[in-house]
Amino acid sequence: MTAVPAARPITAAEIAAFRRDGAVLLRGVLVQEWLDLVADGLEECFAERDHMSSEVVSRGATVRADQLLAARSASLRRFADESPVGGLVGSVLAAPVRFYMDQMFFRRAGPMAPTPWHQDISYHNVEGEDLVRAWVSPDPVPRSASLEVVRGSHRWGVTYRPMVGHDPDMSEEENALRMAIARKRGVYEKGGEGFAYRRTVMDKSLPPTPDVPRHRESFDVMGWDYEPGDAILFHGNLLHGAPEGVILERDRRAYAALFAGPRTRYVQRLGQSVPDPPALTAQEPQTGQTLESFGDVFPLVWSPGDWD
Ligand SMILES: O=C(O)CCC(=O)C(=O)O
């Protein structure tokens, strides 16, 4: 085990809520030391773009999305491996967990760029029932700017197509035209040479992601007033996003770490968006292998009984 215990024990009701809804807000589980590490690590990564830094601009509002931050920042490495979030994920899964990868979604105060609705699982070369996100921020995030989820959608048994990137049924010129039209409307991305959402190939064998904002009343949308010290855990198959048209009164700096339980398997996705961690690529993973097969790349952070 490397994950230290949370500021308070997780309750049976919280574990039941996660399993039922696919997400749960855990109040007051992180002490200040962890929030300082997250704030330091995010500011450090924000200040220095790397080859996977992407800036997504939407009508004058910008979000910086970076990938694999623990590999760049000692503070975030420590948070991923040693903070209580790994053990909290293990507690909801009742299983050993490994740190898989992490991302930041960094917005300064001002108009807020939305996060399009999606499931995390479809952006990565993994599949299975126990990929779980731990979302934390050193900033208060009001309900109006909250991460939002469709309650229970982790149990729909569907993997949706992320609605980003190249349409393989269109020519290069048509794709370029599509992006030029979006740019004219103020929606564009400044990606890095190692990663950009727009370079994803749309996997047309998967159904399109439902348009939640357009048909919002048809979905059971849930969100929270988030306070620093809280952690939001949500299932890798859960539909989630963040709203458009909000003015942020303060920064909204989110750190989102993905943890994997024993049923998480490697799968080569046509629509893979986020590159595999380089240490995994070096081992030439094959579809169907569990992440446990790569224990040196994804070491265990917590196992049942560790906090007893
Ligand atoms: O914080 C956000 O806006 C997006 C977070 C997200 O999509 C994630 O953590 O998977």
Image (cartoon, rainbow, N blue to C red):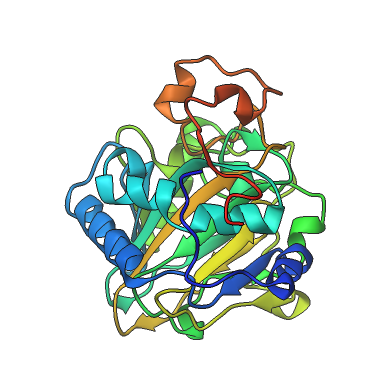
Judged from this view, the residue extending furthest toward the left is 47
Q: In which quarter of the image is the C terminus?
A: bottom right
Examine the rendered structure and indicate whether residue 70 appears above or below residue 243.
above
In this picture, residue 42 sits left or right of residue 184: left
Pinpoint residue 250: horizontal percent, then vertical percent. Answer: 29, 80
Query: In the image shown, does 293 or 301 lie closer to the viewer?
Result: 301
Q: In which quarter of the image is residue 285?
A: top right
At 37% from the left edge and 53% from the top edge, which residue is drawn?
Answer: 79
At 74% from the left edge and 57% from the top edge, which residue is drawn?
Answer: 154
Pinpoint residue 149: horizontal percent, then vertical percent. Answer: 64, 69
In this picture, residue 51 sits left or right of residue 247: left
Q: Quadrant of residue 126?
A: top right
Query: In the image shown, does 260 or 183 lie closer to the viewer?
Result: 260
At 23% from the left edge and 55% from the top edge, which residue is drawn?
Answer: 46
Examine the rendered structure and indicate whether residue 155 appears above or below residue 267.
below
Work out whether residue 190 can be spotted. Answer: no
Label tally: 0
Query: In the image shown, does 82 or 69 lie closer to the viewer?
Result: 82
Pinpoint residue 45: horizontal percent, then vertical percent. Answer: 24, 50
Pinpoint residue 304: horizontal percent, then vertical percent. Answer: 66, 49
